[in-house]
Amino acid sequence: MTRVLLVCIFTGVIHSIDALYYSSRIAAVRVRKLGIALTLFNFLIILARGANTIQAPITGSLVDQAMVGYTHQVPAAVLMSLAWRFRYIIFSATIGSILGALLVPSFIQVFTRVLSIFEREASVMKLFLRMFRFRTYRVLVESVRKPQVKRPDEHEKSTIPKGFLIANVIVVAVYTTGVLSTIYSGALIPVFRLTADNLSGVVNVIATILLVIMVDPMIALTTDRAIAGERSEHDVKVMVWYLVAGKIIGTLIAQIVFLPASGVIASVAMVINKPGVMLHPASLLQFFPRLF
């Protein structure tokens, strides 16, 4: 249970940072410095990726422990227990996304000040040393803002494309469950477990392609237009609100996608190793649960 708790904590941190990443666009619009904003936020992204690097092998160990003594087929009771552990991990992604959403208004205030300081100091090292000053903690306390639960509302209407927002939900769902499904699929097909594990790269590529083609360009375009004065800061706020809300929804959808995705990955691993099984597709149904 300690492993599960540790993975849940790392997962929560990762998704909190991902949620806050969207809000960096609002800070960028306020100071009119998108490049600096993204550069500074990359430090937090590095922390998130570091947490992900530590999390992955620990998550894999959950499957290893469950499969001890089973070389060809893992009993249904063991698989069910393992699946619930993975569901806890996915739920921690939802909790992390909600926490990140609640911190968005405060983060915008802090990040806006950080951008102004960095532009004045022009040194990451000096910015880092400022963290150890007492005044910094006072500023952090002063920057705390009430969480924004309701959609930003003004007289002007937003023109954020709905297709872009739906794509964001899909990307989040795939990203949240992608690696977890591939790791879990190794328990469904122990003989070809290595093949299944290596399919995580394919899943991540699909999510990345969707992100690069359908989500990132619209985020960048809306932000750039706001900085140029062609759109209002309100539009960016609405966009961020929908993106963060979509992230929370995406992690919830990941709960539904988790087991079917694991079944698909196990089936693909079987087909790769035994192409002849395609002549008997019914044999692949063994990897799909009756109740998702």
Image: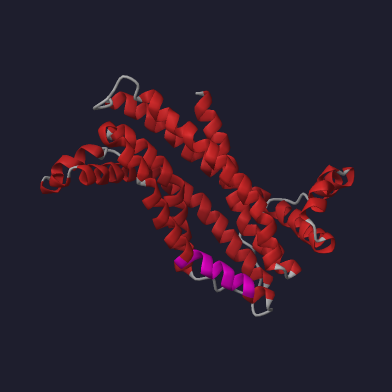
Q: Where is residue 9 in the image (x, y as percent from the top left)?
A: 57, 35
* Magenta span: 213-224
Describe residue 144's horizontal placement relative to residue 168 as left or right. right
In the image, residue 196 lies in the stretch drawn in magenta: no
Q: What type of secondary structure mainly makes up the magenta span?
A: helix
What residue sits 84% from the left and 63% below the top? 120
Q: In this view, does 101 lie above or below 197?
A: below
Q: Nearer the viewer, residue 160 or 108?
A: 108
Residue 67 seen in this snapshot: yes
Q: Please, is residue 89 above or below residue 72 in the view?
A: below
- Is the C terminus in the top left, top right, bottom left or bottom right quadrant? top left
Q: In this view of the protein, can residue 150 be seen by the observer?
A: no
- Decide which of 130, 125 is in the foreground and name it: 125
**289 or 214: which is nearer to us?**
214
Question: Outermost residue toward the bottom?
Answer: 230
Residue 223 shown in magenta: yes
Asked which colour scheme the image uses, the reply is: secondary structure
Left or right of 108 in this view: 74: left
From the top left corner, tell me how far across and down residue 251 is, in percent.
47, 47
Find the residue positioned furthest to the top: 69
Name the residue: 31% across, 19% down: 69
For image coordinates 19% across by 42% down, the residue present is 284
The total of numbered circles placed on residues is 0
Q: Position of residue 277 (x, y in %)?
A: 14, 44
Q: Which of 166 and 38 is in front in this view?
A: 38
Find residue 33 and report its horizontal and vertical position in percent.
72, 68
- Relative horizontal placement of residue 225, taking residue 263 as reference (left or right): right
